[in-house]
């Protein structure tokens, strides 16, 4: 009997065994918790809606929290980790310190989910679902959230300092920053439309309302100076959208065309540059804006998640198990 022929079936079996044990990259899926925690999404939704009903501004804060998480190490809930002797967290990084909010809202949602299915639903997924539910609550777009992210055991203050966009960024910097995370220029302009809700602190727009005579409406600047003195009052708040501050609509883009963008990084989107046409399109077509915003948010949720055996499911979102 030919020895090669007799060994062939054994080799085939060994190959099958080897392939069956090879790691496969787990994919995010909207149905990830259907069997393990079927009430996860409804539990999160109830908790998030309760928090926003208490303070409508929280809707904007939760969308921003998800965004600031995903831009640093991917969507892994690293932003939620408190500092420890071994972790220098992201909460106190420049773009986050004193401005990112909603940690307690995510903690509350996690607590409710832990009651119905302990140790199953990640904090990273709760952040992603909370952003969608927040948008929906204030009449913004909704989208199907893919699930199955796991939580990091690390955080990076240095990456938060370098990866997150800043309110002083010019257009080319914004395009480059978002491109580095896989977003097109149109995605970037659509995501900026989240500034149709929420508020900003005086120090972020002081220079624009006092020292910018060319691309700001004079009446708008005068109105904003009333609540933001030339010195002091750094934390005084102003609505990013003066017209409809609590509704998710396309007025943000109409404001830009009228030179009424609050932050420098807002107005650069309509200032004679390559994104003027996108802003004009969104100002005229609210349904296009909302569809593009939803698509970009799905894309954001896909930024390098931890899946499969990578990462953990934290029991408490602010600490490693």
Image (cartoon, rainbow, N blue to C red):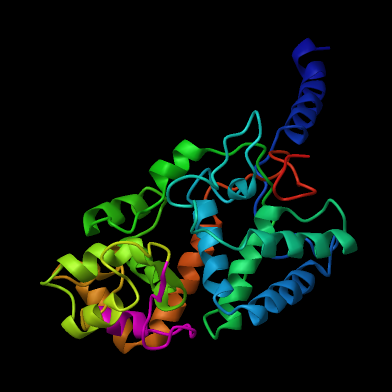
Point out residue 41 in the picture as x, y percentages from the top left corner: 75, 70
Residue 83: quarter of image:
top right
Picture quarter with the N terminus: top right
Residue 99 appears in the picture as rendered: yes
Point out residue 161 in the picture as x, y percentages from the top left corner: 42, 43
Residue 205: quarter of image:
bottom left
Question: Residue sitting at 54 percent across and 55 percent down?
Answer: 302
Is 56 positioned to the left or the right of 17 in the image?
left
Question: Residue sitting at 22 percent across and 67 percent down?
Answer: 208
Point out residue 158 in the picture as x, y percentages from the top left corner: 45, 36
Is 34 positioned to the left or the right of 107 in the image?
right
Is 315 positioned to the left or the right of 287 in the image?
right
Point out residue 195 in the picture as x, y percentages from the top left corner: 41, 73
Pick the residue in front: 202 or 78.
Answer: 202
Picture quarter with the C terminus: top right
Is 247 positioned to the left or the right of 274 in the image?
right
Q: Residue furthest front?
A: 232
Q: Is residue 304 above or below residue 264?
A: above
Residue 281 appears in the picture as rendered: no
Q: Is residue 234 above or below residue 309?
A: below
Question: Residue sitting at 19 percent across and 68 percent down?
Answer: 210
Pick the residue in front: 104 or 295.
Answer: 104
Question: Residue sitting at 77 percent across and 32 percent down?
Answer: 21
Q: Which residues are magenta?
A: 236-256
Q: Is residue 71 above or below residue 61?
A: above
What number of labels is visible?
0
Q: Residue furthest left?
A: 214
Residue 240 included in the magenta stretch of the image? yes
Pick the residue in front: 30 or 177.
Answer: 177
């Amino acid at each position: 009997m030919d020895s090669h022929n007799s060994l062939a079936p054994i080799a085939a079996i060994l190959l099958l065994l080897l392939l069956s044990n090879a790691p496969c990259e787990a994919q995010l899926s909207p149905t990830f918790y259907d069997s393990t925690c079927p009430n996860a999404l409804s539990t999160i939704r109830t908790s998030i809606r309760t928090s926003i009903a208490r303070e409508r501004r929280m809707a904007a804060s939760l969308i921003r929290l998800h965004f600031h998480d995903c831009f640093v190490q991917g969507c892994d809930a690293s932003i939620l980790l408190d500092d420890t002797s071994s972790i220098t967290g992201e909460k106190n990084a420049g773009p986050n310190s004193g401005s990112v909010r909603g940690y307690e809202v995510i903690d509350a949602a996690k607590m409710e989910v832990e009651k119905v299915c302990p140790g199953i639903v990640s904090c990273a997924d709760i952040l992603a679902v909370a952003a969608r539910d927040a948008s929906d609550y204030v009449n913004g777009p909704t989208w199907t959230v893919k699930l199955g992210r796991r939580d990091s055991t690390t955080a990076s203050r240095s990456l938060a300092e370098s990866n997150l966009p800043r309110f002083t960024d010019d257009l080319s910097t914004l395009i480059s920053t978002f491109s580095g995370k896989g977003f097109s220029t149109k995605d970037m302009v659509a995501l900026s439309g989240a500034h149709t809700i929420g508020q900003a602190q005086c120090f972020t727009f002081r220079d624009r309302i006092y020292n910018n005579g060319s691309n700001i409406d004079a009446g708008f600047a005068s109105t904003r100076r009333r609540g933001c003195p030339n010195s002091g009052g750094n934390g005084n708040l102003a609505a990013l959208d003066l017209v409809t501050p609590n509704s998710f609509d396309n007025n943000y883009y109409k404001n830009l065309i009228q030179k009424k963008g609050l932050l420098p990084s807002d107005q650069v989107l309509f200032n004679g540059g390559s994104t003027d046409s996108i802003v004009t399109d969104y100002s005229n077509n609210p349904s296009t804006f909302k569809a593009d915003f939803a698509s970009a948010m799905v894309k954001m949720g896909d930024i390098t998640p931890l899946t499969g055996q990578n990462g953990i499911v934290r029991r408490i979102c602010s600490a490693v198990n």
